[in-house]
Amino acid sequence: MTIEKATPIQTMNTNELIKAFTAAFTSDNIENWKKLLAPEGEWKVMATGEVFHGLDKMVELANRSVAARKHSGELGIKPTNVFQNEEGTKLCWEYVHTGIVTENWPSTSSHKPTPGTKFTLPIMLICEIKDGKLTEVREYFDLLTLLEPDTPHHLYS
């Protein structure tokens, strides 16, 4: 009887993961993006309190997001600051997302943006990394910037 050794699973190092995430996320390549997520991971949209747990729900979120806006020309997802901790277990991915709202905008808010409205939204992703996969993503943005794009909001002035 011959016993075969199991081939170890190759995982990406953090630098490879960041490059692959950036390529997939900035091109709306959901299939390549999906490969970077831990099957039991979760994506939290901090502005709304929504939590998408597990690969199927995170892919559902991505599909809804892509359907809700369109990009052309200079519009799209543009990273501005990307960095990791020394151990490679945390990733900060800051970007500006510009797009045009479509009729598939998923919000249940009464302040739903009108299809055709252009938006510019700074967003910050804080990610936990384990075994070369994103296990938790916390997405931060100002919800009022989307719901009332032409209205200035001030807290301290």
Image (cartoon, grey):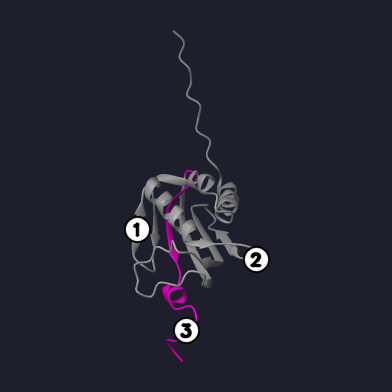
- On the question of residue 40 being in view, the answer is no
The disc label shown at residue 15, or none = none
Residue type (three-letter) at the residue carrying disc 2: Glu
Relative to 118, say whether 83 is above or below.
Answer: above
Q: Which residue is mark 3?
A: 151
**How far across and how far down the image is residue 147, in percent?**
42, 75
Residue 80 painted magenta: no
- Circle nearer the viewer, 1 or 3: 3
Q: Name the residue nearer the viewer: 48 or 39.
A: 48
Give the alpha-carbon distance from disc 1 to disc 3, as whole Å: 28 Å
The boundaries of the magenta stretch are 131-157
Image location of residue 91, percent across then percent down? 51, 57
Q: Secondary structure at mark 1?
A: strand
In three-dimensional space, the C-alpha distance between marks 1 and 2, rounded to whole angstroms, equals 30 Å
Q: Residue at x 51, y 26 (%)?
A: 7
The residue lying furthest to the right in this view is 73
* Of pointers 1 and 3, the one earlier in the residue sequence: 1
The answer to whether residue 115 is seen in the rendering is yes
Gap in angstroms between the C-alphas marked 3 and 2:
23 Å
Please rate how many residues cluster around mark 1, counting C-alpha atoms within 10 Å: few if below 14, some from 14 to 19, many from 20.
Answer: some
Please state which amino acid type lies under the numbered disc 1: Val
Q: Look at label 3 and name its amino acid.
A: Thr
Mark 2 closeness class: few <14, some 14–19, many ≥20 residues within 10 Å: few
Q: Secondary structure at mark 3?
A: loop
- Residue 113 in percent (x, y) is at 44, 72
Q: Which residue is mark 2?
A: 74
Tag 1 residue: 51
Q: Residue at x 55, y 48 (%)?
A: 17
Residue 94 sits above or below residue 146 on the image = above
Compare marks 1 and 2 and give the one earlier in the sequence. 1
Inspect the magenta stretch and tell me whether residue 137 lies in it.
Answer: yes
Task: Give the class, few, some or many, for how many residues have Cα within 10 Å of label 3's Cα (few <14, many ≥20).
Answer: few
